[in-house]
Amino acid sequence: MNVQITERSEDRKYYIDGTFYETMPQQDNIDSWDYHPSFECAKEVRLASLYCGESDINKVVPDLLHSMWEGSNIYLKAHVRALLGAKIDLNDNNFFDIIPAHVYKKHLGLKDRICEYVFSTHPRPDNYDYLLDLTRVLDQIKRYGLNINTKGFRSRSVQDRNFAKRLAQAAPCCDYNIFGTRTGRLATNPGTFPILNLKKEYRGIVHPRLDCVVELDYNAAELRTALALAGKPQPQTDIHQDACYRVFDGKITRDEVKTETFKWLYGGKSKYNKQLNELYDKETILNKHFFGDHIVTPFGNKIECDEHHALSYIIQSTLGEIVLKKLIEVEHFLRQYKSNIYFTVHDSIVLDFAEEDKSILYEISKIFSDTPLGHFPVSISAGTNYGNMKAVKWRV
């Protein structure tokens, strides 16, 4: 059953095989471009965006439909511009009472045909169930939104003013794009809160919706991923401190070890390349996962790259999927509690945490630390806002 959803503010209609419905009828099988929470009622959901690995439908329109789709977009946007020019607030009025039904019917009918084209030309991805679960969790994060409090924010520099301008134009939510990077790491969509590149000095504007913000973060995640990929044991202490004494006999500082290690990891020239290659066994990792012009991760993801980028791509892609798999598991665990997933940033997940759930924090951290590549130590911090985080004493 082809289903497309028109949603703006509180207005929503379901377009199913040429007919609009005010409520979602029971459907066993749903084909659509985008995910919507109402799809939970279906036994089988096929999302065309996941089949073709592209979040922007405009990039997959077949030649046969291209001119019709482009014309429909132009026509629909013209209606919106006319309404805005007449000073009609689209948020205060029922969008579907203003825009003629035939305009949307034509547009959504074409969207159905684009989806049918994608399903007929793209096989179901091997990791489709994972992609669908991830899409569901990220949609939930987007709809949950953020509590952004700018009362204490002061624009003292050009950088501050630029950030304030960007913030004013951004919706207070994290809207992630799962196809936004080559390595599979998340990106954020334009016009939403820039959580992935939010500078530390601005984190204080992110407040909890419940009682506090809790962050779970892997200790030296990329390097632990490298050790796991090479089949080497994980030190359960600080990984840079461990290398400082075990590899360099304490002759250089922890900070220097960390700096040189990340130079080595990302293809720069470190004066300790030989020692670091031996410590993390770069040769073994590349022999297992690099095939001349592409890499294949332990999860079966194939990414084209040259040898210079191979190691960092293997590690970043593998780690990125580990974090997202753990995100899904933690979200599933939290369904019976008041606390929620708030957002994810690189190698960490952040919770909007309720005081009444403090007894489950240790169990959450155990879920996060138990990765497909073994046990990764997890640091936990908490605070009254995202910029005021303090380490919780115990570590998993």
Image: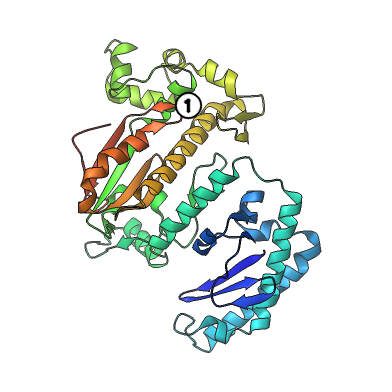
Q: Which residue is mark 1?
A: 268
- Viewer can see residue 208: yes
Q: Is residue 375 left or right of residue 255?
A: right
Return the residue nearer the eye: 60 or 141: 141
Q: Residue at x 30, y 53 (%)?
A: 337
Q: Is residue 267 left or right of residue 33?
A: left
Q: Position of residue 58 (x, y in %)?
A: 67, 61
Badge 1 element: loop
- Mark 1 closeness class: few <14, some 14–19, many ≥20 residues within 10 Å: few
Where is 226 relative to 43, above or below? above
Return the residue nearer the eye: 254 or 326: 326
Under mark 1, the amino acid is: Gly
Which residue is farthest top? Answer: 249
- Viewer can see residue 389: no
Q: Is residue 208 left or right of residue 37?
A: left
Q: Position of residue 62 (x, y in %)?
A: 76, 59
Where is 146 relative to 248, above or below? below
